[in-house]
Amino acid sequence: MVDVPQPSPSRLTPFSGSPVVVGVVPDQPSLVALTAASLVTATGRGRLCFGYADPARYAVEELPDGTVRHASLDPDGVDDSWKATQSRIRRQLEETLRDVDVTWDLYYLAGRPDRALTHLARAVDAATIVVGTREPGAEARVRELLEGSVAAHLGHHQHRPVLVVPLSVVDWKVSAPWD
């Protein structure tokens, strides 16, 4: 059995001045980026490392700076279509953060979001990882049931704290499992 390093005080990255990794998706509500920016500002001017893990691509090589070389899962697909998605996310972040004084970068990652964000967090020595909750709707619930929660996977498979930003709240009294 491989000895996996466990969470401990010796592995803690100080919040003050350390990077924060933020999982993003296209058209995500601005609340996730703004929450992460508020955290970085409150803890002493670290930087935000936004990461989007494209599920239609796989990592060919993970590089020490947190970036990845990636390729399309579809061998017949247009290989540069990812650039439009990257530009779209960058524009959305620029718009969201235009009045916020933070340093940030966007990393275009590939594959499973939990693994990709863990790689990025290790590479930049992030103090924490920030993600939003799933989007509302039956399709998202089924996908989460089959694939699991990104936040839960992160919480169980790496040692950094995970801050989960609620994007849709359901009233306990009104909701039923089939709603």
Image (cartoon, helix red, strand yellow):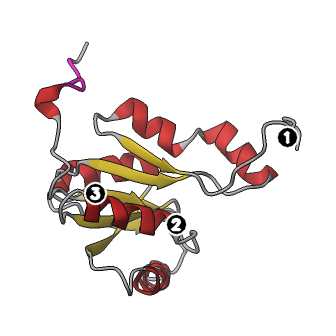
Region rendered in magenta:
3-8
Marks 1 and 3: CB-CB under 8 Å?
A: no
- Mark 3 element type: strand
Kind of residue at disc 3? Val
The image quadrant where one finds the C terminus is top right
| Relative to 175, 126 lies left or right | left
| Relative to 78, 22 lies left or right | left
**Number of the label disc, if any, that sits on residue 81:** none
Kind of residue at disc 2? Leu
Q: Nearer the viewer, residue 91 or 53?
A: 91
Name the residue beneath numbered marker 2: 31
Q: Name the mark nearer the viewer: 1 or 3.
A: 1
Q: Name the mark nearer the viewer: 3 or 2.
A: 2
Name the residue rendered at 56%, 69% in the picture: 28
> Residue 76, can we see it?
yes
Name the residue rendered at 26%, 51% in the picture: 121
Q: Residue furthest left?
A: 10
* Percent coordinates x, y for residue 59 in the rendering: 35, 58
* Percent coordinates x, y for residue 61 in the rendering: 25, 58
**Marks 3 and 2, how far apart in space?**
15 Å
Name the residue beneath numbered marker 3: 20
Name the residue beneath numbered marker 1: 175
State which tag comes first along the sequence, 3 or 2. 3
- Mark 1 element type: loop
